[in-house]
């Protein structure tokens, strides 16, 4: 089975600013924490649902059952498993280097069998030349 991939663009990744400033999708600048990026890009959660929400467990109740099991705390089934909590802590660290936070995020997502790749551009976007028809 092919391993799931998560692409994180550091330019739009909200990280290393502390938990009080962190959101799944921050309204002021459109930046997203690692879980916000994952929920939108990999799980297809509408950005409007993520906007201004600080933690997955604050998302609408009906959404929890549609997301991957690793996000939920067992046996009660609501969001914010221990792994989610660890990802939030690592993402929001202000006292760690960029390299350290990247390594920690990569290690933690790997526990959910997700490979993280930090990219400087949006993937799978065609150039104008490729989109033009003869």
Image: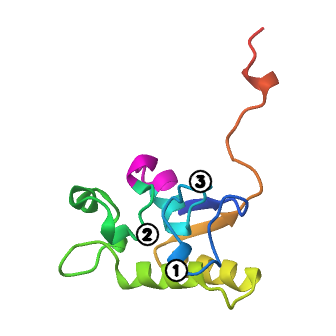
Crowding around mark 1 (Cα neighbors within 10 Å: few <14, some 14 to 19, many 20+) is some
Instruction: Tell me which residue sits at (18%, 78%) in the image.
Output: 76
Q: Position of residue 37 (x, y in %)?
A: 54, 59
Callouts 2 and 1 close, C-beta under 8 Å: yes
Q: Residue 19: which disc?
A: 1
Q: Position of residue 123 (x, y in %)?
A: 69, 47
Q: Position of residue 30 (x, y in %)?
A: 59, 53
- Above or below, 101 against 59 in this view is below
- Above or below, 8 against 73 in this view is above
In this view, the residue in front, 115 or 2, is: 115
Colouring style: rainbow
- According to the picture, the residue beneath numbered tag 2 turns out to be 54
Q: Position of residue 42 (x, y in %)?
A: 48, 54
The quadrant in which the C terminus is found is: top right
Residue 78 occupies which quadrant of the picture?
bottom left
Spatial CA span between label 3 and label 2: 13 Å
N-terminal of the pair, mark 2 or mark 1, is 1
Callouts 3 and 2 close, C-beta under 8 Å: no
Task: Kindly tell me whether residue 46 is visible in this rendering.
Answer: no
Which stretch appears magenta?
40-49
Crowding around mark 2 (Cα neighbors within 10 Å: few <14, some 14 to 19, many 20+) is many
Residue 21 occupies which quadrant of the picture?
bottom right
- With 30 as the anchor, is 100 left or right in this view? right
Assess whether residue 129 is covered by the magenta stretch. no
The image shows a total of numbered marks equal to 3
Spatial CA span between label 2 and label 1: 8 Å
Residue 31 occupies which quadrant of the picture?
bottom right
Task: Kindly tell me whether residue 52 is visible in this rendering.
Answer: yes
- According to the picture, the residue beneath numbered tag 3 turns out to be 30
């Amino acid at each position: 089975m092919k391993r799931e991939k998560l692409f994180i663009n550091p330019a739009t990744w909200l990280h290393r600013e502390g938990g009080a400033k962190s959101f799944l999708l921050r309204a002021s600048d459109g930046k997203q924490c690692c879980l916000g990026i994952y929920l939108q890009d990999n799980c297809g959660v509408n950005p409007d649902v993520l906007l201004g929400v600080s933690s997955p467990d604050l998302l609408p109740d009906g959404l929890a059952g549609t997301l991957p099991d690793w996000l939920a705390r067992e046996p009660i089934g609501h969001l914010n498993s221990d792994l989610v909590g660890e990802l939030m802590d690592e993402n929001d660290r202000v006292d760690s280097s960029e390299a350290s936070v990247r390594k920690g995020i990569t290690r933690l997502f790997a526990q959910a069998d997700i490979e993280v790749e930090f990219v400087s551009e949006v993937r799978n976007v065609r150039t104008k030349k490729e989109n033009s028809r003869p």
